[in-house]
Each structure stands twice: as C-alpha cells, then as structure tokens.
C-alpha cells in the first residue's frame, strides 16, 4: 500500500496535469431562463429588454410564419416574432413546437415582439455525428437541431468575447462556420470534434475538443495529449517504484 505522503504526491501530480494539459473545452450560451408565451404576456415588463439588455428563451407553437414576421402561440396567448433573419427559420413550418432565444421587447403602444438570436425545434432534437458535407448539402434538415461534426480549424478569430472559426472537412474541402463562447487553447490546424446547435448556417458550439484516435492515450486519460499522458503515467510509475524500495 502507498503511504499517505505518496498518495498525496500522486493526487497532486494528477490534478496539476489535468489542470495544465486538458484539451477538451466547453461553454454554454443556451442555459437561459425559459418562459412560456402565457407567462410573458401576463407580465411583459418583467421580460422587457428594451432598456436593459437580456436574453430569454420562449416556447410555443408556430401558428403563422411569413416573410416579415411569425406568430407563436401557447395556451391561447400569442407573441409576434421578427423573422428578418430568414435563415434562422429554414425548415420550420406552421404548427411546429419551437423554442426561440433572443430579446423580447415590450411596446405598450404597439405590438410586443421577440427578436431571435437562434431558433430550436422543441423538444430539442440531437442528430448525433454528421459530416460537414451532409450538413451543407441539406441545411434545412439540420437547422434548429443539435449536431456533432469533425474537421480541421482553418480559420480562427476572437472578438467581443466570442471565437469565430471555420471548420473544414479535409477530405472534401467543405466547411462550416462555428461560434464558440468560452476559453480554449485550440488553434489553426487542430483536428477537432464540435457539438452544438446548428442554426442559420452557423454551428453554435457548446463543447469541442481534439479529435483523437480511439487508441490514443487520451482514450485512457481523457483530456490529455499523448506527451502529457505519458508524463502522467511515468510519474505514477516512479512513485510506485520508490515505494517498493
């Protein structure tokens, strides 16, 4: 058995390596307050973003959808939705349940309106792993749904608290734009797996990490590169050998 001192050393080394070498990163912009249309209509000023910027998610059924606006309803209550960004609503049709995230603006003299940032099918649909070529060939099928895809980062830019990157399928040259909110040490040339909401031609990433072979050291030690994984195993081996002396 290891002594208390050896055990402490082992735990300390492992924690430090995990903190310094993790390659998987994640962030979520989707964990917002969800409100049914009826609740918003009962007290619109409580959700108003006209004076103070905020985002909420609204759930309802599409009862009308046109070129300039749509209407979602829930329990007899209706809410107008701005559809100027038509690409957000590709593949959606009247009668579908929907979740819209964005800004709600209350106008006492006119009509209250929801201005969407992104739109989801509801309940949330996760398609799983899809290649970039398939997404680009039929974007309406995947629009408003969760997908995972793999590719190489071929362009990376950080601005206003958001990473904007281009993810490219090297076998076909097809690419997709990715938005990512969070910290990461990933860089151009890295092969990554990205998971998140595909909406309006953009993959809003909730998590992404290095794409590795199932037999790589990261399979045994998640979040580790091959080199740092070997260092970790080496440290464990040294501690065990010292204990046996």
Image (cartoon, rainbow, N blue to C red):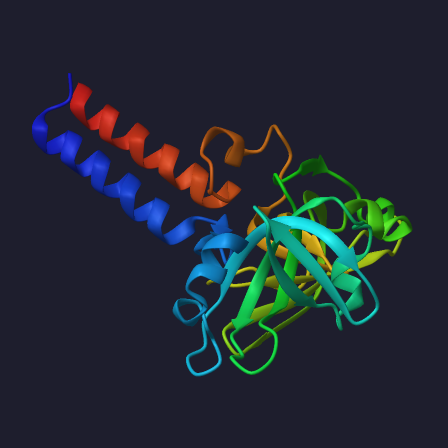
Instruction: Specify whether residue 143 is in view.
Output: yes
Q: Nearer the viewer, residue 213 or 199?
A: 199
Give the residue at the far top of this rendering.
1
Residue 42 position, x and y percent, is: 44, 60
From what the image shows, is residue 167 above or below residue 15? below
The residue sitting at 8% across, 28% down in the picture is 4
Q: 183 left or right of 140?
A: left
150 sits to left or right of 11: right
Which residue is nearer to you in this view: 208 or 105?
105
Above or below 41: residue 68: below
Task: Please state the horizontal and vertical placement of residue 47, each as a whole percent of the image.
Answer: 44, 67
Residue 72, image x and y in percent? 66, 55
Observer-nearest of 133 and 45: 45
> Percent x, y for residue 99?
61, 51
- The answer to which quarter of the image holds residue 200 is bottom right
Residue 25 higher or lower than 103, as above or below: above
Residue depicted at 61% across the width and 40% down the height: 124
Q: How many marks?
A: 0
Residue in the picture at 79% in, 49% down = 94
Q: Quadrant of the C terminus?
A: top left
In the rendered view, tell whether residue 84 sits above or below residue 126. below
**Can you tell which quarter of the image residue 116 is in?**
bottom right
Residue under the image location 64 percent in, 61 percent down: 118
Name the residue nearer the viewer: 79 or 131.
Answer: 79
- Tell me if 24 is positioned left or right of 241 in this view: right
Q: Residue furthest left?
A: 4
């Amino acid at each position: 058995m290891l002594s208390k001192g050896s055990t402490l050393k082992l735990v300390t080394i492992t924690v430090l390596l995990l903190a310094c070498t993790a390659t998987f990163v994640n962030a979520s912009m989707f964990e917002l307050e969800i409100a049914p249309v009826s609740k918003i209509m009962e007290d619109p000023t409580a959700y108003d973003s006209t004076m103070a910027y905020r985002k909420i998610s609204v759930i309802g059924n599409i009862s009308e959808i046109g070129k300039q606006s749509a209407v979602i309803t829930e329990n007899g209550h209706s809410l107008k939705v701005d559809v100027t960004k038509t690409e957000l609503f590709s593949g959606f049709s009247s009668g579908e349940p929907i979740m819209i995230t964005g800004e709600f603006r209350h106008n006492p003299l006119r009509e209250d309106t929801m201005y969407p940032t992104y739109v989801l099918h509801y309940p949330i649909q996760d398609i799983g792993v899809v290649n970039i070529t398939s997404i680009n060939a039929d974007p309406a099928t995947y629009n408003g749904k969760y997908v995972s895809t793999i590719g190489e980062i071929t362009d990376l830019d950080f601005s206003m608290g958001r990473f904007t990157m281009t993810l490219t399928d090297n076998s076909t040259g097809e690419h997709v734009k990715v938005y990512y909110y969070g910290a990461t040490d990933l860089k151009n040339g890295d092969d990554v797996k990205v998971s998140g909401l595909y909406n309006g031609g953009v993959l809003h990433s909730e998590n992404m990490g290095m794409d590795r072979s199932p037999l790589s050291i990261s399979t045994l030690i998640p979040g580790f590169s091959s080199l740092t994984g070997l260092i970790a195993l080496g440290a464990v081996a040294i501690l065990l050998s010292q204990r046996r002396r």
